[in-house]
Amino acid sequence: MKAILLSSALLLGACATSPSAPVLAPNSNLLAQGIPPIPMSLVERVGKYTDFRGHSFVEWHPTKNEMLVAHRKAGDNVPRIYRLDQPLGEPQQLTDGAEPVTRASWEPRQGRYIVFERSRGGDEADQIYRLDPATRQSTLLTNPDEAHNIVGWVRATSQLLYTAVPLDRTAQGGSRPTIDTALWIVDPEQPQGKRKLADLPGPGWFGGSLSDDGRSVAFTRYLSAAESQVWLVDVASGARRQLLPAAGESIKATHFDAGISKDGRRLYVISDRAGEFRELMTLDLAEGALTRISSHIPWDVTAAALSDDGRWIVAQANVDGRDELRVFDAATLKETAAPAVPPGGIGAMGFHRGLHRMAYAINSAKGPSELFALDPTSGRSQQWTRAQAPAGIDPSTFSDQTVVRWKSFDGLTISGIVTRPPARFAGKRPVIVSIHGGPEAQAQMGFQSRWNYFIQELGITVIEPNVRGSAGYGKTFLTLDNGTKREDSVKDIGALLDWIAQQPDLDASRVMVTGGSYGGYMTLATAVRYSERIVGGVPIVGPSHFVTFLTNTESYRRDLRRVEYGDERDPATRAWMEKTAPLNNADKIRKPLFVVQGKNDPRVPYTESEQIVAKVRANGLPVWYLRGENEGHGFARKENADFLFYAMVKFVEERLLK
């Protein structure tokens, strides 16, 4: 991979300071080019919006009424794993170090130790460690030349199953023509005895629900956003068999493993094989019969949790961008009365193995994630954590969100989430259009974190569109942007710009576009097609040319992305990619850009950003560029994310508010 060299003169210019006013210099892990000095006065007025802190549910203790949570405490740079031994108690820190840790699991019989995943510098090459909670000493269990994911535990023996995929840095020529996924089993207290169970063909094997007896593990094999399979692997022999689609079925649909029943007779799955939306179903493992459970819900079911006593199934239904709880009786498969939960969207959830309760997270426009425990019999919840806001800020006053809809160029209805500023801001308001990644992700209602500064203090309206190809609106909608139909999703943004121009409270002459990952590509594509209708763009870790992106992304991701974007090896598809690439149309970009990238990004290589920066600058247009040397697909460290946000505020004030 050949890096694009950028002007050192611009770097020196970015570090220039005025002798009359103090400025914030980028830290040693940030390369800042073309970015004007950030006054400390800006930092002081914006800084309080950078320290909202919630909690993410990780796992219950196997025997005690306590849980593992992921949290970034005051003064820390990254989230870590904490032990919370009582509702609203003081979390006890377990992991440390410079890297974020958000996934961990207790040894399943007594909770003698935990295992956790951690990568380095945003490279997503997760390694698995064993941690002694008493001493906080950790031991590496895995091969650093591979990326790993925890699958689950054989409870009776406390053996851990995990998957491993090779990385391109160990490949001859820096790339691999094919990828297999290895399934391993290990006793974390005796890692030298680890054993490979199977080589699973291709990438995309994830999930992993173990049967209660530890003999079988169910996997999802992800082929694309529109197609996946469910397989069952024998833990003793490594033999595998495909469950869904069943032998002889030609159906192309999504099938996701959602757990094996306690008696081992049924597998719960989430699938869109019966219609437009993903439903919760159960598969009889002996007979192969499928039973639909949630067909009455006209939205996607996105997750499910099974109580250990076999009585309850709790599902999440994505209702127009907000996840709701739905509770089912496992014996009758009928939905019961919905529990009373706090307002907001449901996040991660999980049942305690021995106690009659289920943890879940609530995230809303009024605050970041808080954790609760639900008794499904009574429907009552108990709060376990409280989100923390900086002094002087009351998130309960923050603006609510609404869903809006507009017609695109071909009559298709597109929706988006709008967050408007407080009523004290009169007149037509400037707009930031923030486009999600994926492409098959979805803008959902929830806390805006730092972005509340734009809304609450600068009076900017934020619109998050769900263009065609977004999840949550049916499997037909999901595929409407595939391959050479990609430009149709860009036209959806053009239709949104038309809609903005028709709104009495919005200023169509002051619109900025931003987005991360695929949203970064959409930002560049919008800057190409609709340059005269925006004031600037902030593409973050976005591809600038699908051919170079597919050539240089990690090999374990390449085939999965070809299904979405098209196969660059096909001459006709490659010609279309060359014709439409923002990199090859940079001369049409006539408004300034602020490009953001992580140096260690395994998904969108940093050269995708650097080549568009160089091309646009060569056309004489100003481009700000910020690269995190210790970041990957986004900025995970608070000090880096803070500087990015301060610089973005500066860009917004110079481009959008003038």
Image: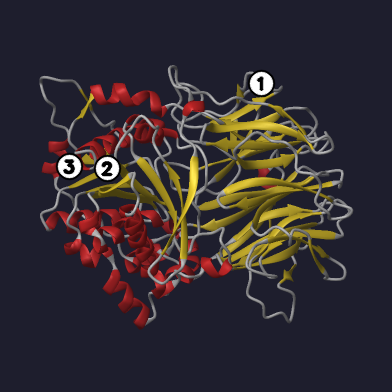
**Res. 634 image quadrant:** top left
SS state under label 2: strand
Q: Quadrant of the C terminus?
A: top left
Q: Quadrant of the N terminus?
A: bottom left
Q: Which residue is mark 3?
A: 34
Numbered badge on residue 17: none
| Of callouts 3 and 1, the N-terminal one | 3
Rounded to the nearest angstrom, the CA distance separating label 3 from label 1 is 46 Å
Residue 351 placement (x, y as % from top left): 76, 40
Q: Amino acid at mark 3?
A: Gly
SS state under label 3: loop
- Label 2 CA crowd tier, 10 Å (few <14, some 14–19, many 20+): many
Q: Which residue is mark 1?
A: 88
Q: Nearer the viewer, residue 617 or 366?
A: 366
Q: Amino acid at mark 1?
A: Leu
In the image, 484: left or right of 389? left
Q: Amino acid at mark 2?
A: Leu
Residue drawn 26% across and 32% down? 26
In the image, 27: left or right of 405? left
Q: Nearer the viewer, residue 277 or 284?
A: 277
Q: Which residue is mark 2?
A: 626
**Res. 483 image quadrant:** bottom left
Q: From the viewer's perspective, is the residue at label 1 or at label 2 nearer?
A: 1
